[in-house]
Image (spheres, helix red, strand yellow):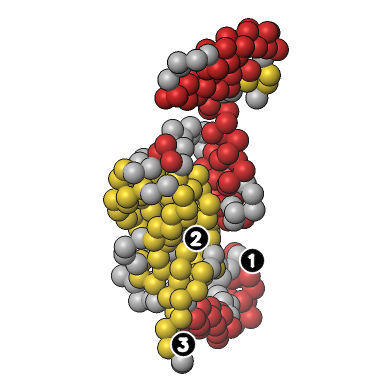
Amino acid sequence: MRIKRRNVVWLGTLGALTAIAVLSQGFDSGASILLLSALGLAGGVALFDVEPQQLIKTVQERTVLGGKTSADAREAAERAKARGMISATSVQLLDVGLIALHERYDGMVMQRTRSLSLDDNSVRPYVTLQVPALDADRHAVIRFEIDDGDGDRVYSHEKRQYMRDGKLDIMADTQMPLFDSTMGLNPGECDLRVYVDGDLVGILGFTLSPSVRDRWAGRREKSAESRLRDDAPADPVEDDVPMSLEDLLRQQSNRD
């Protein structure tokens, strides 16, 4: 915001003429208020160079970056930008994560985590968005996608969400089963992707570990293979090695 010094003289002259008109006898009070309001608006436009888009951007940066954006959201947003996709949405990512449901001896426990296991019962993604007023009061399509350790798409869920201005917490309506899942989930480094109206706004990485049962099964299999190798008989010495003609004659001579 910069002051336009070239308009100061012009604005002063306009102010003087307005004062004469307002102070003159017989001037209507309602008209005086309207004239003064117009003078104030004209003064703001004349004196200050305001760029609306820059002002909106500054407000959004102060709101979002002022200690409210989580580290996971910053990482996810940077990974999305690294894909080279230009997002057209003005919605900002404040937080993104996974809520795991795990059964313990004292009941079911819900926990935010980036380290899942196939011993967990299920997982549900969520996202927190900052919706500007200019992009609010409408419905948007929020899509969650999860790729497993082999890059296979194992979860996809869309929901229509009414976008109110301000901070908005959104959780997927469905859970992805983990324990005894029939989808053949591949453990490893996985990804959660979040889209708003088709625009990729974040990619969050997380780890999926095998279940304890699968780990023990793998150990037993390796142990069995090791025992088979140890118990395997040594290669037999072949007795039927072809004899040379000299050895054959010598053997025949000894018999005679």
Q: For this rendering, which residue is in front, 131 or 98?
A: 131
> Do the residues bearing badges 3 and 2 touch, measured as CB atoms within 8 Å?
no
Amino acid under label 2? Gly
Disc on the earlier residue, 1 or 2: 2
Residue 177: quadrant of the picture: bottom left
Above/below status of 132 relative to 190: above
What kind of element bears circle 1?
A: helix
**119 relative position to 247: left or right:** left
Residue 31 in percent (x, y) is at 43, 20
| Most distant residue in the front direction | 25
The circle drawn on residue 246 is 1
Q: Position of residue 64 (x, y in %)?
A: 58, 47
Look at mark 2 in the image and give the residue it sits on: 97
Specify the label residue 104 is tagged with: 3
Spatial CA distance of label 1 from label 2 is 82 Å
In percent of width and height, residue 156 lies at 33, 55
The residue shown at (36%, 48%) is 163
Q: Residue at x 53, y 80 (%)?
A: 219
Mark 1 is on which residue type?
Glu
